[in-house]
Image (cartoon, grey):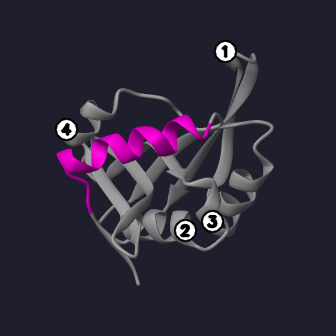
């Protein structure tokens, strides 16, 4: 069975594992995730995906990190985590994604995110531009 729930301190080591296996995802210190909107997706009681977002203004959010265990990708887990955020009262949601991450960009487009900007040379190692995306509920 799959479920989404708030992330907890006990999830941080597993979240770090997933983050390490996902070089295309943002790499923050997972301890900081506890201070934000932090959700995990579980399959058979094991954390297999997570999403972290922060409120930047009432009704406006920024997705800081989203990653799925490589063995559980393309099963709708990231989509479910994003949809939970979008239906939790968020009027606008922003994020950056690597220009080369076509799989993620396709997912965001299917969820009605639109490209609003390009940040040249935003990501290091390897240097790459970021595509800034926005979802607006209206």
SS label for mark 2 = helix
Look at discs 4 and 3 and give the one toward the viewer: 4
Disc 4 and disc 3 in contact, CB within 8 angstroms:
no
SS label for mark 1 = loop
Judge whether residue 13 is colored magenta. yes
Q: CA distance from mark 4 to mark 2?
A: 22 Å
Q: Position of residue 95 (x, y in %)?
A: 53, 42
Lower position in the chain sequence, tag 1 or tag 2: 2
Q: From the image, tell me which residue sits under label 3.
A: 112
| Residue 61 visible in the displayed image | no
Q: From the image, tell me which residue sits under label 4.
A: 35
SS label for mark 4 = helix
Q: Position of residue 120 (x, y in %)?
A: 73, 19
| Residue 16 visible in the displayed image | yes
Judge whether residue 12 is colored magenta. yes
Q: CA distance from mark 4 to mark 3?
A: 27 Å
Q: Kindly identify the residue that appears in the image at 29 percent across and 51 percent down.
A: 38
Lower position in the chain sequence, tag 4 or tag 3: 4
Query: Which numbered dot is residue 79?
Result: 2
Disc 4 and disc 1 in contact, CB within 8 angstroms:
no
Near mark 1 (Cα within 10 A), the count class, few <14, some 14-19 or many ≥20, is few
Answer above or below: position of 53 versus 78.
Answer: above
Q: What's the magenta region?
A: 6-22
In the picture, measured across the screen, residue 122 lies left or right of residue 4, that is right
Lower position in the chain sequence, tag 4 or tag 2: 4
Q: From the image, tell me which residue sits under label 1.
A: 124
């Amino acid at each position: 069975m799959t479920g989404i729930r708030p992330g907890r301190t006990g999830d941080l080591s597993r979240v770090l594992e997933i983050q390490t296996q996902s070089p295309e995802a943002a790499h923050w210190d997972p301890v900081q995730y506890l201070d934000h909107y932090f959700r995990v997706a579980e399959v058979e009681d094991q954390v297999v995906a997570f999403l972290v977002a922060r409120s930047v203004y009432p009704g406006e959010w920024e997705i800081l990190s989203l990653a799925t265990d490589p063995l559980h990708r393309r099963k709708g887990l990231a989509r479910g985590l994003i949809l939970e955020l979008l239906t939790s009262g968020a009027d606008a949601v922003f994020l950056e994604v690597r220009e080369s991450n076509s799989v993620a960009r396709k997912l965001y487009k299917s969820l009605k995110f639109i490209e609003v900007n390009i940040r040249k040379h935003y990501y290091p190692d390897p240097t790459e531009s970021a595509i800034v995306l926005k979802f607006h509920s209206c």
